[in-house]
Image (cartoon, rainbow, N blue to C red):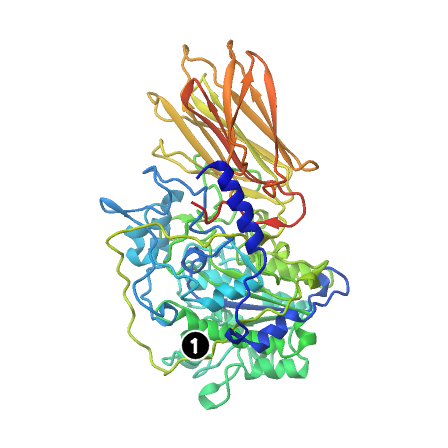
Amino acid sequence: MTSAHQRRDFMRLAASSLATAALAPEAFAQTLRQAMSLPANNRTGSIQDVEHIVILMQENRSFDHYFGSMRGVRGFGDPRPVTLTSGKPVWYQPNGNSYLLPFRPAGDNLGLQYLEGTPHGWGDSHAAWNHGRYDQWASAKGSNTMTYLTRKDIPYHYQLADAFTVCDAYHCSVMGPTDPNRYYMWTGWTGNDGRGGGPVISNAEVGYDWSTYPEVLERAGVSWKIYQDVGTGLDAAGYWGWTDDPFIGNYGDNSLLYFHQYQNALPGSPLYEKARTGTNISQGGTLFDVLKQDIAKGSLPQVSWVVAPEAYSEHANWPANYGAWYIDQVIKALTADPVLWSKTALFVTYDENDGLFDHMVPPFAPYSKQSGASTVSTAGEFYNAGAAQPGPYGLGVRVPMIVVSPWSRGGWVCSQVFDHTSLIRFIEKRFGSQYAIADTNTSLWRRTVCGDLTAAFNFTKPNEDAKPLQLPDTKGYYPPDFVRHNSLVPVPPTKQTMPLQEPGVKRARALPYELGVLGRMQSSDKSMALEFHNTGRAGVSFYVNSPLRSDGPWVYTVEAGRKLSDSIPAASPAAQNYDFSVHGPNGFLCQFKGRVPSSTSPASAEISYRYDVASNSVLLTLMNPGSSELRLRIANRYDGQGPHTVSVPAGKSVQDVWNLEDSHGWYDISVSDARDDSYQRRIAGHLENGRPSISDPALGTS
């Protein structure tokens, strides 16, 4: 495909896909059509218009497993994936003498199949992560790790994301199982300081004593509640919500019940009444009776958590579309009262990824001088407290997050980095100016790298997107029987191909990032000197790797308004070439390739760049430190004009300006040297100007 044709295709896809696809009215539920058209509370034009926060955390799905093939998100069509030490993109997971690619299991109606689960403990998760090399998924998790579903399989999830805002950089908090991740959601950490029974990296559930965020809310006077089914009793036989019947109870997913202060709470006390009560459908009624009653009475709390029984949790071995039915019932209950819905933000997310693969290497804190550096304290982010393998707690793998509210409708993507502590941060942001609800558990590093989810909302003009959209009817997803069926065991295809991502873009929320990395190969010690700049409004984690080295990767955390420098040897002393890539959020990439300099080799060009937000441009400065003229070839993937050549006189510098108006701020600029085919400098990403944009037009193209 020529660059001119490519650019025209980018813009055509952008124009055609910014509007949500029109589907036949009979395919949708009338309730949701009304919900999408209801105006948002816009009294202040700020987060203060949110009066109810509802969090529905489901189970065990990775982002790529659900949404890797969705248009407009960083999925299977990612044009700038991490490269493994094998030299192949991250999807080519080593598998014996070959590799394993993502694959859709054979069969029909996969959304109602009981897919076999995968290992998802601390040890196997860190083995797959492999010190950040991210190349042991098949060996640590088995072949099922690479399975994925499509719009055909889970249409409700896709259309819910298309109707509202999907976050494609939302991570679970821990490289490990359910409970530690839910502890992060409810408490900000997993007892990382070793007190109160922590740190907890497994589903031990033996009872803990550190502080929880609902207790902070209670002391401050912020109303809260857990919506769940009691099953056979929330403390039956000490199992705190577990039951042999997967269609009742809470599957043990109300992790507050593993804390002694809740276990010892007496009837009538706030912790008992708000965390240890619920429906009892084994005695009659429905799973949503208490939620519906509170809505009807006008007593929905300011903060609520909804916990599903096992069969509806979307856990592996249970159909994804049983979960779609459950999510739909929650949304219908909330939208039954238009006034309440106009003031409600619902977050639909997943506690962890099971053992399911996702291609985005999660940010993690540098834990030694050899692993990188940070401008902010990384205390509390590294586990080394027991017999289990030492390692970073997280961030964990990307999981789906759909922000469903009157302020987040319209088919958007938000690509700021978040994790489960971002939910606490959102509650803080909303109610912190009125109440003393500060979370003291979440680490400073995590607060620096992860946002507070406000970027996913349009509080100033939310009703511009008030359109009568609808979602598919989920009646067919209600269990036809109440039986646990045998699991479908996926078999990888004999002929592997990389899965396709839907073409087109989504509207993209403005992000707080403005990043730059400068790199220079030093002839004195044959090392790559890297300088990380963060001139944006949010902290960031940079990931650096090299396919020519056996060590690494390296990670660098840089706070907003700060910079950080380091140097990494090119490779072994005898190495002739170097190759370093620096990845950041929202497709940011800087790449430095070339020959290791010697005393006789000519000087290579040095490249720097800066953003001119006012003119929506990237300004390259091309420097020639040598004694002879350089001819540099420069190309931008998102520009239809093709490459051009710039001559840089000896000892001089030349500026090359790239206007990004036509590409909506996206750039992928490479610089090569006509006399040295090994030399390349590449910078790619998105120029943020504080305004909404579109998702990366290169996603889903070939």
Q: Nearer the viewer, residue 6 or 222?
A: 6
- 10 Å neighbourhood of mark 1: few (<14), some, or many (≥20)? some
Name the residue at 56% across, 19% down. Answer: 623
The mark tally for this picture is 1
Q: Is residue 201 above or below residue 221?
A: above
210 displayed left or right of 252: right
Can the viewer see residue 534 in this picture? Answer: yes
Check the image and name the residue furthest to the bottom.
Answer: 283
278 displayed left or right of 112: right
Classify residue 579 by image quadrant: top left
Q: Nearer the viewer, residue 35 or 359?
A: 35
**Image coords of residue 691 (percent x, y):** 67, 48
Q: Quadrant of the C terminus?
A: top left
Q: Nearer the viewer, residue 683 or 144?
A: 683
The kind of residue on which mark 1 rests is Tyr
Q: Quadrant of the N terminus?
A: top left
**Image coords of residue 652 (percent x, y):** 59, 14
Q: Is residue 47 above or below residue 280?
A: above
Can the viewer see residue 442 in this picture? Answer: no
**Image coords of residue 78 (percent x, y):** 45, 46
Q: Nearer the viewer, residue 452 or 131?
A: 452
**Image coords of residue 28 (percent x, y):** 53, 74
Name the residue at 49% across, 58% down. Answer: 191
654 displayed left or right of 80: right
Name the residue at 49% across, 55% down. Answer: 71
Classify residue 216 by image quadrant: bottom right
Q: Which residue is mark 1?
A: 477
- Secondary structure, mark 1, is helix
